[in-house]
Image: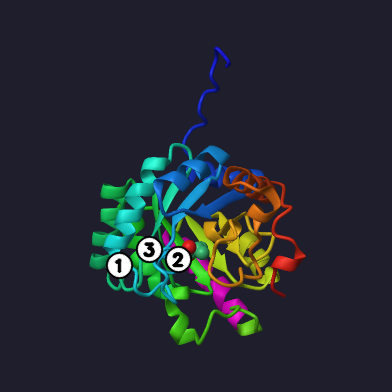
């Protein structure tokens, strides 16, 4: 054993994420829902750990994320927070928990105060600009989420790629800019054609994280259970089973981080045209 243990790297912050974008260093993100997995992700150097409302599907076994409540998110976020030392903790605002500024402040405030969240994430476009503005003005960093928004699955009519037509692509770029101007600190793009994701990433100043959005994004996020090959049914086209390739959880997570950092993931087989 070394007499001089390695100093721990400093905690990831909005400023260090911004610096990674400026330096062209890819940002590795994953979801987690409990302290034990959070610890593994933290030790592997995952930059951002999201307590996603995907927990409604992968933990609770629902068909969609819609049944997830604020108290579900609080319970899992508090557990994840106990496992983190390095990674930034981002907590998803669940369905209908941010329908007004007052409600968004109340619920996001609980994640910040009770679960040590460093950022909250919410789905939606320009219609969320006022809420993003108010949250950030109250010191709550916000990650916006454009493209496929699972909380709108019934309105969209399925889990479908978004922004394929020129008008929809232009509208998404415009909404991304409005959210950045409103104060968003980060953005997730889910299931959008890679050319559009590249356009948005190159236009925005904040880090843009892709899931099914191609390699040009500033970073990548996947659902932990998908990369560990334990999700119900087939894993999505944009994901990869790192467990099958690496044999144990620690090695799988580390391989994912390395693959994102070296831009080896996502490959052409994981993107939409
Ligand atoms: O809920 C979630 O896990 C998410 C990610 C898939 C981006 O929103």
- The location of residue 181, given as percent across then percent down, is 46, 62
**Residue 173 belongs to the span the image colors magenta:** yes
Task: Please tell me the numbered disc located at residue 132.
Answer: 3
Identify the residue position indicated by label 1 in the image: 69
In the image, 1 versus 221, the foreground residue is 1
Q: Does the beta carbon of the residue at mark 2 sit less than 8 Å from ligand 1? A: yes
Disc nearest the viewer among 3 and 2: 2
Q: Which residues are magenta?
A: 168-183
- Give neighbour class at mark 1: few <14, some 14-19, many 20+ (Cα, 10 Å): some
- The location of residue 133, given as percent across then percent down, is 36, 62
Q: Which comes sooner in the sequence, label 1 or label 3? A: 1
Identify the residue position indicated by label 2 in the image: 54
- Give neighbour class at mark 2: few <14, some 14-19, many 20+ (Cα, 10 Å): many
Residue pictured at 52% horizontal, 45% vertical: 41
- The location of residue 80, given as percent across then percent down, is 39, 48
The answer for how far apart the CA atoms under marks 3 and 2 are is: 21 Å
**Residue 180 belongs to the span the image colors magenta:** yes
Tag 3 secondary structure: helix
């Amino acid at each position: 054993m070394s007499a001089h243990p390695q100093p721990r790297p400093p905690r990831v912050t909005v400023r260090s994420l911004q610096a990674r974008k400026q330096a062209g260093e890819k940002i590795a993100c994953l979801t987690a829902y409990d302290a034990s997995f959070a610890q593994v992700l933290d030790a592997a150097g995952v930059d951002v750990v999201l307590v996603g409302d995907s927990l409604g599907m992968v933990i609770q076994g629902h068909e969609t994320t819609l049944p997830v409540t604020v108290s579900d998110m609080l319970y899992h976020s508090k557990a994840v927070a106990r496992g983190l030392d390095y990674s930034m903790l981002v907590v998803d605002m669940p369905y209908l928990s941010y329908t007004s500024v007052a409600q968004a402040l109340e619920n996001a405030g609980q994640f910040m105060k009770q679960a040590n969240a460093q950022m909250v994430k919410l789905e939606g476009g320009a219609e969320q600009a006022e809420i993003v503005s108010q949250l950030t003005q109250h010191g709550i960093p916000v990650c916006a989420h454009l493209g496929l928004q699972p909380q709108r699955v019934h309105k969209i009519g399925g889990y479908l790629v978004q922004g394929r037509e020129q008008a929809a692509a232009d509208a998404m770029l415009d909404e991304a800019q409005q959210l950045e101007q409103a104060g968003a600190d980060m953005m997730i793009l889910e299931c959008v054609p890679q050319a559009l994701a590249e356009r948005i990433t190159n236009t925005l100043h904040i880090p843009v994280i892709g899931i099914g959005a191609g390699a040009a994004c500033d970073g990548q996020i996947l659902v932990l259970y998908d990369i560990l090959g334990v999700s119900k049914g087939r894993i999505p086209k944009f994901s990869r089973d790192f467990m099958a390739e690496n044999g144990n959880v620690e090695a799988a997570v580390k391989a994912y981080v390395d693959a994102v950092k070296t831009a080896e993931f996502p490959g052409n087989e994981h993107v939409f045209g």
